[in-house]
Image (cartoon, rainbow, N blue to C red):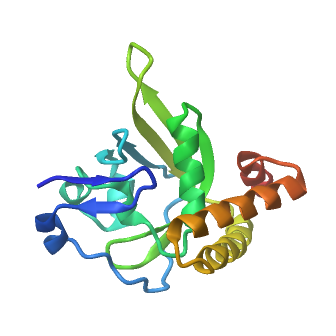
Amino acid sequence: MRSFSNSFGVVLLSHEKRAVWQRPQPTGHEVFFGENEIIVSKTDTKGIIRYANQVFIRISGYSESELISMPHSILRHPDMPHCVFKLLWDTISSGNEIFAYVKNMCKNGNHYWVNAHVTPTWNETGQIVGYHSNRRVPCRSAVAEMEQLYRHLRTVEARHADGKQGMAAASQELTQTLKGVGVEYDEFVFSLER
């Protein structure tokens, strides 16, 4: 059984794996992890999980065997705008790091917010061979701001019948919003932590 995700992290599973895994329905219930805990995962260049630490396993509700070899996007919450994941993938696949606020979904449909730091992993010849993500507890006031921004971006995406057009429109909206306050996405995230 093989599973993989495309460049935007959309879950693409084999027929057999799809029969076993069902995307949960959001419950609206938020779960939390400790201030001193860090959720860690490592993926290959396609976003397939190769390592998950115990905090990640506990919070997500998936077992280690359920996470390993699955696309990281199995955690994607439907409230997350596609344009944010496009920004994330464009950034890390070009060899840069990114800090991002992400709302993830647990196996049971609960959700949790993270302040994610995602970096590429290189081999000895300088090729990107995967990605490493550390997720920390986010600032609660920042979560409230990001929820409002993400809700707006999802509305922009939903105005278009074509998903790519919707993502492009929302990406442009995000760019204009950030330009309006004179910062890049990372700087915006950092400014919310203060």
Q: Is residue 83 above or below residue 51?
A: below
Q: Is residue 102 visible?
A: no
Q: Quadrant of residue 144?
A: bottom right
Q: Quadrant of the C terminus?
A: bottom right
Residue 56 in picture, x, y percent from top left:
38, 56
Which residue is painted at 55% across and 54% down in the image?
A: 86
Could you say which is closer to the camera, residue 12 or residue 186? 12
Q: Quadrant of residue 98?
A: top right
Residue 29 in picture, x, y percent from top left:
48, 83
Question: Residue 135 vs residue 152: left or right?
Answer: left
Q: Is residue 182 visible?
A: yes
Which residue is painted at 31% across and 48% down in the image?
A: 49
Question: Residue 191 vs residue 2: left or right?
Answer: right
Residue 20 in picture, x, y percent from top left:
15, 72
Q: Is residue 6 above or below residue 78?
A: above
Could you say which is closer to the camera, residue 166 or residue 17? 166
Count how many numbered circles sit on residues in the image.
Answer: 0
Which residue is painted at 37% across and 47% down in the image?
A: 47
Q: Quadrant of the N terminus?
A: bottom left
Q: Is residue 171 above or below residue 30?
A: above
Question: Residue 185 vs residue 32: left or right?
Answer: right
Which residue is painted at 53% across and 79% down in the image?
A: 161
Question: Residue 130 vs residue 177: left or right?
Answer: left
Could you say which is closer to the camera, residue 50 or residue 17? 17
Could you say which is closer to the camera, residue 144 or residue 2? 2
